[in-house]
Amino acid sequence: MSRNQSLTSNVDWGLLIVFFLMLIMGVANVYSVAYNEEAPNIFDFSQKYGKQILWVGFSLFLGLLVFLIDSDIYRKFAIPIYLFCIVLLIVVLGMPAKNGAHAWLGIGSLGIQPAEFAKIGTAIALGSYINSVNVKQQNVTTVLLANAIMLIPMVLILLQPDAGSFLVFTSFLFVMYREGLTYDPIILKLVNQIPGIKFKSTWLGSHFIPILFVVVFLSVITLLMSNNVLTFEFWPGLEIPGFIGVILTLIIISLVSYVILRWISARRDKRRVTFIVLIGFLMASLISTSVNFGFQGLASHQKERIELFLGLREDPDVDDYNRNRAMAAVGSGGLSGKGYRNASLSSVESNHVPESETDFIFCPLAEEWGFFGSIVVVVLFLFMLLRIVAIAERQKSRFTRVYAYSVAMIIFIHFAVNIGMNIGFAPVIGIPLPFFSYGGSSMMSFSMMMFILLKLDSQRNTVLS
């Protein structure tokens, strides 16, 4: 089968159909939330819904262009594409600030966010690099270079500052973990410097990403029970400082874990079980202690933001205004919603929910279509994510697999964080909902990202590298 034949016959139509369905729903949602009675025509380009249609049309044009490009181009020019994105991230730092961040490159109301396109460049560069190395024989240089590809744009984005895009770039950690790229060489390099110690591998380095999640979890638990944030009722009527409560809780968890593991392991490896539980307890205690003292060293406004997010402090009309209004709008939709264009709390005209057409686009959707409509959107995103993972797993090319997993993780973080901050489960950090939020940069980057994936996948049977 030739390349031209495979281009048309191997397109993943399921993913493409969901993509177009989301585009249509997104335009309809923007039209509803930004509706202006004086300009009801959806093709009125002076209105946000008219501009959104322009962005969708231009995005589809760009998508078609990248789809027509031979997939070898993305592999051969991965580094130049990546470097071009880095240059844009550097240039944008010299641009005037907009909404407190140097994130926009353009003139007046017309502009793009280089951070959105840097996600594509980083995904392509990471795929090209991992495809060129032998992961089974990775060394310190291999690990450092892979992480540098991710960290360079992250640092530049942090300088803007753009916390939302910075968070999205952490998705590449999971991609590297999936491909077997670990921090083992670095940990070994450090540990083996100690006289009398010689390890060939370390559990810490091989499972750094899951450990990182455990660290985050323990950090949140520590803050919830920290003595300067909240007292801990260890027993009815007996309140003790939260920090001491953390340690006591960890001791109890460790003892219970020890008994369970000893019972599971029977008599086969009791020393190892004891060692694992002991090390786990010591690490958890160290993490809790560090987080506790680190929290006390934060500025007062930083503490307030953390307390608001964890629900330890309420300020619905000032610091927690956005999240409070968003949750009220989502909840007002009930099970079946108020009907299309009947959103009262989350419309642009009411201004009850700030940025309801961009970062809080899920609010009018939930208010108009209720719980049932919201579930439909969630199911569509889950289908898209599972479809992309299936595409990744069927690839013969490691480059395409890495790129596909990168796309899946980027969309997942956008989807999870955006909906999370709309319903109060995540901090408000300014991150759009793919294919739904108003804006050109996000629409163009996600469309290009999707069509590059479709093109790479369409040639899966001819591209073996």
Image (spheres, rainbow, N blue to C red):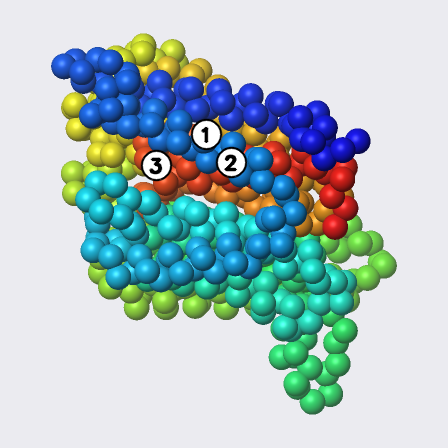
Name the mark nearer the viewer: 3 or 1.
1
How many circles with numbers are drawn on the protein?
Answer: 3
Query: Does dot 1 land on a helix, a strand or a loop?
Result: helix
What is the three-letter code of the residue carrying label 3?
Gly
Residue labelled with disc 1: 60
Please give the residue where the numbered disc 2 appears in the rendered image.
65
Question: What is the x, y in percent for residue 67?
Answer: 57, 35
In the image, which disc is placed on residue 209?
none
Viewer-closest of 334 and 242: 334
Of the image marks 3 and 1, the number of the one nearer the N terminus: 1
Q: Looking at the image, is 277 positioned above or below residue 57?
A: below
* CB-based contact (under 8 Å), mark 2 and mark 3: no
| Nearer to the camera, 359 or 198 | 359
The CA distance from mark 1 to mark 2 is: 9 Å
The 10 Å Cα crowd at callout 1, few under 14, some 14 to 19, many 20 or more, is some
Q: Where residue 340 appears, x then y in whole percent? A: 31, 11
* Label 2 Cα neighbours within 10 Å, binned few <14 / some 14-19 / many ≥20: few
User: Which is nearer the N-term, disc 2 or disc 3?
Assistant: 2
Across and down, in percent, residue 210 comes to 60, 54
Residue in the image at 22% along x and 34% along y: 354
Residue type pointed to by label 1: Leu
Mark 3 to mark 1: distance in Å? 12 Å
